[in-house]
Amino acid sequence: MENRKIKIGFYALTSCYGCQLQFAMMDEILQLIDKAKIECWYMLSRDSSEEREVDIAFIEGSVSTKEEIELVKKIREKAKIVVAVGSCAVHGGVQSWGKEKELEQLWKTVYGDGKVKFEPKMAEPVEKFIKVDYKLYGCPPEKKDFLYALGTFLVGSWPEDIDYPVCVECRLRGNSCILIEKGEPCLGPVTVAGCDARCPAYGVACIGCRGAVGYDVAWFDSLAREFKKKGFTKEEILDRMRIFNAHNPKLEEMVNKIFEEGE
Ligand code: SF4
Ligand code: SF4
Ligand code: SF4
Protein backbone atom coordinates (compact mmCIF):
# COMPACT_ATOMS: atom_id res chain seq x y z
CA MET A 1 0.00 0.00 0.00
CA GLU A 2 1.36 3.39 -0.94
CA ASN A 3 2.34 5.60 1.96
CA ARG A 4 -0.14 8.35 1.19
CA LYS A 5 -3.62 9.32 2.22
CA ILE A 6 -6.41 7.49 0.40
CA LYS A 7 -8.51 9.95 -1.59
CA ILE A 8 -12.24 9.54 -1.13
CA GLY A 9 -15.31 11.15 -2.62
CA PHE A 10 -18.95 10.96 -1.53
CA TYR A 11 -21.40 11.96 -4.24
CA ALA A 12 -25.16 12.42 -4.08
CA LEU A 13 -27.61 11.68 -6.87
CA THR A 14 -31.38 11.92 -6.36
CA SER A 15 -31.86 10.88 -2.74
CA CYS A 16 -32.97 12.00 0.70
CA TYR A 17 -29.28 12.47 1.73
CA GLY A 18 -30.00 10.09 4.61
CA CYS A 19 -27.08 7.77 3.83
CA GLN A 20 -24.40 10.44 3.89
CA LEU A 21 -26.00 12.15 6.87
CA GLN A 22 -25.86 8.84 8.75
CA PHE A 23 -22.12 8.53 8.04
CA ALA A 24 -21.24 12.21 8.43
CA MET A 25 -22.68 12.10 11.97
CA MET A 26 -20.46 9.20 13.09
CA ASP A 27 -17.77 10.02 15.68
CA GLU A 28 -15.56 7.34 14.11
CA ILE A 29 -15.41 9.28 10.84
CA LEU A 30 -13.09 11.77 12.57
CA GLN A 31 -10.54 9.00 13.21
CA LEU A 32 -10.75 7.67 9.66
CA ILE A 33 -10.47 11.10 8.13
CA ASP A 34 -6.94 11.28 9.50
CA LYS A 35 -6.03 8.43 7.13
CA ALA A 36 -8.00 9.73 4.16
CA LYS A 37 -8.21 12.88 2.09
CA ILE A 38 -11.70 14.04 1.24
CA GLU A 39 -11.73 15.25 -2.35
CA CYS A 40 -15.48 15.57 -2.58
CA TRP A 41 -18.09 15.35 0.15
CA TYR A 42 -20.15 18.52 0.17
CA MET A 43 -21.82 17.66 3.45
CA LEU A 44 -18.42 17.56 5.20
CA SER A 45 -16.15 19.86 3.25
CA ARG A 46 -16.67 23.10 1.36
CA ASP A 47 -13.45 22.33 -0.54
CA SER A 48 -15.15 19.63 -2.64
CA SER A 49 -15.13 19.02 -6.37
CA GLU A 50 -16.61 16.29 -8.57
CA GLU A 51 -13.77 16.86 -11.05
CA ARG A 52 -11.00 15.33 -8.90
CA GLU A 53 -9.50 11.83 -9.12
CA VAL A 54 -10.28 9.58 -6.13
CA ASP A 55 -9.33 6.13 -4.88
CA ILE A 56 -12.80 5.35 -3.57
CA ALA A 57 -16.05 6.91 -4.75
CA PHE A 58 -19.15 6.41 -2.63
CA ILE A 59 -22.34 7.13 -4.55
CA GLU A 60 -25.69 7.72 -2.86
CA GLY A 61 -29.02 8.05 -4.67
CA SER A 62 -30.71 6.72 -7.79
CA VAL A 63 -29.95 7.89 -11.30
CA SER A 64 -33.08 9.97 -11.90
CA THR A 65 -32.06 12.70 -14.34
CA LYS A 66 -30.20 12.71 -17.63
CA GLU A 67 -27.51 14.88 -15.98
CA GLU A 68 -26.95 12.17 -13.37
CA ILE A 69 -26.14 9.62 -16.07
CA GLU A 70 -23.25 11.86 -17.14
CA LEU A 71 -22.24 12.43 -13.51
CA VAL A 72 -21.95 8.72 -12.66
CA LYS A 73 -19.92 8.12 -15.82
CA LYS A 74 -17.56 10.94 -14.81
CA ILE A 75 -17.25 9.56 -11.28
CA ARG A 76 -16.43 6.12 -12.70
CA GLU A 77 -13.70 7.54 -14.93
CA LYS A 78 -12.07 9.31 -11.99
CA ALA A 79 -12.36 6.56 -9.36
CA LYS A 80 -10.44 3.34 -8.78
CA ILE A 81 -13.22 1.79 -6.68
CA VAL A 82 -16.91 2.68 -6.91
CA VAL A 83 -19.23 1.82 -4.01
CA ALA A 84 -23.01 2.14 -4.40
CA VAL A 85 -24.37 3.30 -1.05
CA GLY A 86 -27.91 2.52 0.09
CA SER A 87 -31.04 1.19 -1.52
CA CYS A 88 -31.42 4.14 -3.89
CA ALA A 89 -28.00 3.59 -5.45
CA VAL A 90 -28.03 -0.22 -5.27
CA HIS A 91 -31.64 -1.02 -6.26
CA GLY A 92 -33.16 2.26 -7.42
CA GLY A 93 -34.82 2.96 -4.07
CA VAL A 94 -38.45 3.54 -3.15
CA GLN A 95 -38.64 6.16 -5.89
CA SER A 96 -38.62 3.25 -8.37
CA TRP A 97 -41.85 1.96 -6.87
CA GLY A 98 -43.99 3.64 -9.50
CA LYS A 99 -41.91 2.09 -12.27
CA GLU A 100 -44.88 0.57 -14.05
CA LYS A 101 -46.47 4.01 -14.49
CA GLU A 102 -45.51 6.48 -17.20
CA LEU A 103 -42.89 9.08 -16.23
CA GLU A 104 -45.18 11.85 -17.44
CA GLN A 105 -47.98 10.64 -15.17
CA LEU A 106 -45.68 10.42 -12.14
CA TRP A 107 -44.22 13.82 -12.89
CA LYS A 108 -47.64 15.44 -13.07
CA THR A 109 -48.72 13.82 -9.79
CA VAL A 110 -45.66 15.10 -7.90
CA TYR A 111 -44.85 18.45 -9.53
CA GLY A 112 -48.04 19.47 -11.33
CA ASP A 113 -47.10 22.28 -13.72
CA GLY A 114 -43.94 23.19 -11.76
CA LYS A 115 -40.83 23.98 -13.82
CA VAL A 116 -37.43 22.41 -13.00
CA LYS A 117 -33.93 22.89 -14.38
CA PHE A 118 -33.09 19.22 -14.95
CA GLU A 119 -34.26 16.59 -17.42
CA PRO A 120 -36.08 13.85 -15.49
CA LYS A 121 -36.07 10.10 -16.16
CA MET A 122 -37.29 7.05 -14.28
CA ALA A 123 -35.17 6.30 -11.19
CA GLU A 124 -32.64 3.52 -11.77
CA PRO A 125 -29.77 1.85 -9.90
CA VAL A 126 -26.22 3.15 -10.48
CA GLU A 127 -25.13 -0.25 -11.81
CA LYS A 128 -27.42 0.20 -14.81
CA PHE A 129 -24.95 2.80 -16.15
CA ILE A 130 -21.51 2.03 -14.72
CA LYS A 131 -19.58 -0.83 -13.14
CA VAL A 132 -20.08 -0.92 -9.37
CA ASP A 133 -17.35 -2.64 -7.35
CA TYR A 134 -19.04 -2.95 -3.98
CA LYS A 135 -22.51 -2.36 -2.52
CA LEU A 136 -23.62 -1.09 0.86
CA TYR A 137 -27.20 -2.25 1.38
CA GLY A 138 -29.90 -0.55 3.43
CA CYS A 139 -32.03 2.54 3.68
CA PRO A 140 -29.76 3.83 5.07
CA PRO A 141 -26.98 1.23 5.43
CA GLU A 142 -25.83 0.35 8.92
CA LYS A 143 -22.99 2.50 10.28
CA LYS A 144 -20.98 -0.66 10.96
CA ASP A 145 -21.22 -1.63 7.26
CA PHE A 146 -19.78 1.71 6.17
CA LEU A 147 -17.01 1.58 8.79
CA TYR A 148 -16.18 -2.00 7.82
CA ALA A 149 -16.01 -1.23 4.10
CA LEU A 150 -14.07 2.02 4.47
CA GLY A 151 -11.72 0.56 7.10
CA THR A 152 -11.07 -2.51 4.92
CA PHE A 153 -10.33 -0.38 1.86
CA LEU A 154 -8.03 1.88 3.91
CA VAL A 155 -5.85 -1.09 4.91
CA GLY A 156 -5.67 -2.23 1.28
CA SER A 157 -8.03 -5.21 1.57
CA TRP A 158 -11.48 -6.02 0.20
CA PRO A 159 -14.72 -6.26 2.27
CA GLU A 160 -16.82 -9.41 2.12
CA ASP A 161 -20.33 -9.36 0.70
CA ILE A 162 -23.45 -10.62 2.50
CA ASP A 163 -25.19 -13.40 0.60
CA TYR A 164 -27.77 -14.66 3.08
CA PRO A 165 -31.21 -13.30 4.02
CA VAL A 166 -32.64 -11.47 7.03
CA CYS A 167 -34.37 -14.72 8.14
CA VAL A 168 -30.98 -16.13 9.18
CA GLU A 169 -30.38 -13.29 11.63
CA CYS A 170 -34.02 -13.37 12.70
CA ARG A 171 -33.89 -17.03 13.69
CA LEU A 172 -30.52 -16.56 15.40
CA ARG A 173 -32.11 -13.79 17.51
CA GLY A 174 -34.84 -16.21 18.52
CA ASN A 175 -37.69 -14.08 17.16
CA SER A 176 -41.00 -15.77 16.53
CA CYS A 177 -41.79 -15.77 12.81
CA ILE A 178 -44.28 -13.07 11.86
CA LEU A 179 -44.92 -14.70 8.49
CA ILE A 180 -45.67 -18.17 9.80
CA GLU A 181 -47.33 -17.27 13.08
CA LYS A 182 -49.24 -14.12 12.17
CA GLY A 183 -49.50 -14.48 8.40
CA GLU A 184 -47.96 -11.04 7.78
CA PRO A 185 -46.12 -10.42 4.47
CA CYS A 186 -42.55 -10.41 5.78
CA LEU A 187 -39.87 -9.98 3.11
CA GLY A 188 -37.08 -11.32 5.32
CA PRO A 189 -36.63 -14.49 3.19
CA VAL A 190 -35.56 -12.50 0.08
CA THR A 191 -33.79 -9.54 1.72
CA VAL A 192 -30.04 -9.10 2.33
CA ALA A 193 -29.16 -9.60 5.99
CA GLY A 194 -27.07 -7.18 8.04
CA CYS A 195 -29.67 -5.28 10.09
CA ASP A 196 -29.90 -8.06 12.69
CA ALA A 197 -33.56 -8.50 11.73
CA ARG A 198 -34.40 -5.16 13.33
CA CYS A 199 -38.06 -4.95 12.29
CA PRO A 200 -39.16 -8.53 13.08
CA ALA A 201 -37.44 -8.16 16.47
CA TYR A 202 -40.03 -5.43 17.20
CA GLY A 203 -42.88 -7.48 15.77
CA VAL A 204 -42.94 -5.61 12.46
CA ALA A 205 -42.75 -7.46 9.12
CA CYS A 206 -39.67 -6.66 6.99
CA ILE A 207 -40.40 -4.45 3.97
CA GLY A 208 -37.09 -5.35 2.34
CA CYS A 209 -35.23 -2.04 2.76
CA ARG A 210 -31.84 -3.73 2.30
CA GLY A 211 -32.91 -4.99 -1.12
CA ALA A 212 -32.99 -8.43 -2.68
CA VAL A 213 -30.40 -11.10 -1.92
CA GLY A 214 -30.49 -11.66 -5.69
CA TYR A 215 -33.24 -11.37 -8.28
CA ASP A 216 -32.34 -14.77 -9.72
CA VAL A 217 -32.95 -16.75 -6.53
CA ALA A 218 -35.89 -19.13 -6.33
CA TRP A 219 -36.77 -17.67 -2.93
CA PHE A 220 -38.90 -14.96 -4.58
CA ASP A 221 -41.15 -17.63 -6.13
CA SER A 222 -41.41 -19.56 -2.87
CA LEU A 223 -42.23 -16.45 -0.88
CA ALA A 224 -44.82 -15.25 -3.39
CA ARG A 225 -46.49 -18.71 -3.21
CA GLU A 226 -46.47 -18.49 0.58
CA PHE A 227 -48.06 -15.02 0.47
CA LYS A 228 -50.72 -16.35 -1.89
CA LYS A 229 -51.46 -19.21 0.53
CA LYS A 230 -51.87 -16.63 3.30
CA GLY A 231 -54.59 -14.98 1.23
CA PHE A 232 -52.79 -12.01 -0.34
CA THR A 233 -53.92 -10.91 -3.79
CA LYS A 234 -51.61 -10.64 -6.79
CA GLU A 235 -51.65 -6.83 -6.54
CA GLU A 236 -50.84 -6.90 -2.81
CA ILE A 237 -47.90 -9.23 -3.39
CA LEU A 238 -46.57 -7.15 -6.28
CA ASP A 239 -46.93 -3.91 -4.33
CA ARG A 240 -45.13 -5.37 -1.34
CA MET A 241 -42.28 -6.86 -3.33
CA ARG A 242 -41.85 -3.74 -5.45
CA ILE A 243 -41.21 -1.36 -2.53
CA PHE A 244 -37.44 -1.83 -2.73
CA ASN A 245 -37.22 -4.26 -5.64
CA ALA A 246 -39.08 -2.56 -8.46
CA HIS A 247 -36.22 -3.34 -10.86
CA ASN A 248 -36.49 -7.10 -10.45
CA PRO A 249 -37.00 -7.94 -14.16
CA LYS A 250 -38.88 -11.19 -13.49
CA LEU A 251 -41.13 -10.03 -10.65
CA GLU A 252 -44.36 -9.49 -12.57
CA GLU A 253 -43.93 -12.58 -14.75
CA MET A 254 -43.19 -14.72 -11.69
CA VAL A 255 -46.18 -13.50 -9.66
CA ASN A 256 -48.51 -13.81 -12.68
CA LYS A 257 -47.34 -17.40 -13.16
CA ILE A 258 -48.06 -18.25 -9.54
CA PHE A 259 -51.61 -16.93 -9.90
CA GLU A 260 -52.13 -18.88 -13.12
CA GLU A 261 -51.22 -22.14 -11.33
CA GLY A 262 -53.95 -24.21 -9.69
CA GLU A 263 -54.05 -24.59 -5.91
S1 SF4 B 1 -31.08 4.69 0.59
FE1 SF4 B 1 -32.65 5.49 1.99
S2 SF4 B 1 -31.51 6.78 3.42
FE2 SF4 B 1 -30.17 6.45 1.64
S3 SF4 B 1 -30.56 8.19 0.29
FE3 SF4 B 1 -31.92 6.53 -0.35
S4 SF4 B 1 -33.85 6.94 0.74
FE4 SF4 B 1 -32.25 8.11 1.77
S1 SF4 C 1 -40.27 -13.02 10.79
FE1 SF4 C 1 -39.65 -12.58 8.70
S2 SF4 C 1 -37.43 -12.43 8.81
FE2 SF4 C 1 -38.10 -13.48 10.65
S3 SF4 C 1 -37.96 -15.67 10.14
FE3 SF4 C 1 -40.06 -15.00 9.73
S4 SF4 C 1 -40.05 -14.46 7.56
FE4 SF4 C 1 -37.91 -14.52 8.22
S1 SF4 D 1 -35.85 -6.00 8.84
FE1 SF4 D 1 -36.12 -5.53 6.69
S2 SF4 D 1 -37.08 -3.51 6.60
FE2 SF4 D 1 -36.26 -3.80 8.69
S3 SF4 D 1 -34.21 -2.86 8.63
FE3 SF4 D 1 -33.96 -5.05 8.16
S4 SF4 D 1 -34.05 -5.18 5.91
FE4 SF4 D 1 -34.87 -3.17 6.50
Image (cartoon, grey):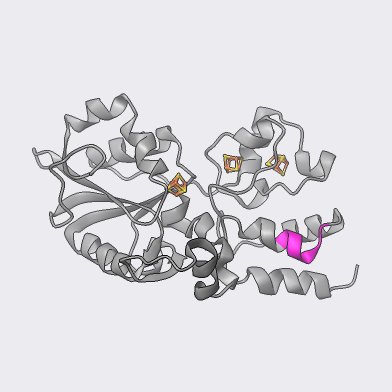
Q: Is residue 130 above or below residue 190?
A: below
Q: Position of residue 147 (x, y in %)?
A: 35, 34
Q: Is residue 111 above or below residue 202?
A: below
Predominant secondary structure, magenta span? helix
Q: Quadrant of ligand 2?
A: top right
Total number of numbered labels?
Answer: 0
Q: Nearer the viewer, residue 174 or 236?
A: 236
Q: Is residue 215 visible?
A: no
Q: Position of residue 238 (x, y in %)?
A: 69, 63
Q: Position of residue 103 (x, y in %)?
A: 50, 73
Q: Nearer the viewer, residue 196 or 90?
A: 90
Q: Which residues are magenta?
A: 232-237
Q: Residue placed at 23% from the left, 60% from the top?
A: 75
Q: Residue placed at 60% from the left, 33% from the top?
A: 198
Is residue 208 shown left or right of residue 137? right
Q: Residue placed at 55% from the left, 68% from the top?
A: 99
Quarter of the image that includes the C terminus: bottom right
Is residue 113 shown left or right of residue 213? left
Q: Position of residue 125 (x, y in %)?
A: 43, 62
Q: Is residue 225 visible?
A: yes
Quarter of the image that includes the N terminus: top left
Q: Residue placed at 62% from the left, 60% from the top?
A: 242
Asked if residue 227 is among those painted magenta in the image, a careful observer would answer: no
Asked if residue 236 is among those painted magenta in the image, a careful observer would answer: yes
Is residue 49 shown left or right of residue 143? left
Q: Could you say which quadrant of the image residue 262 lies in?
A: bottom right
Is residue 15 shown left or right of residue 253? left
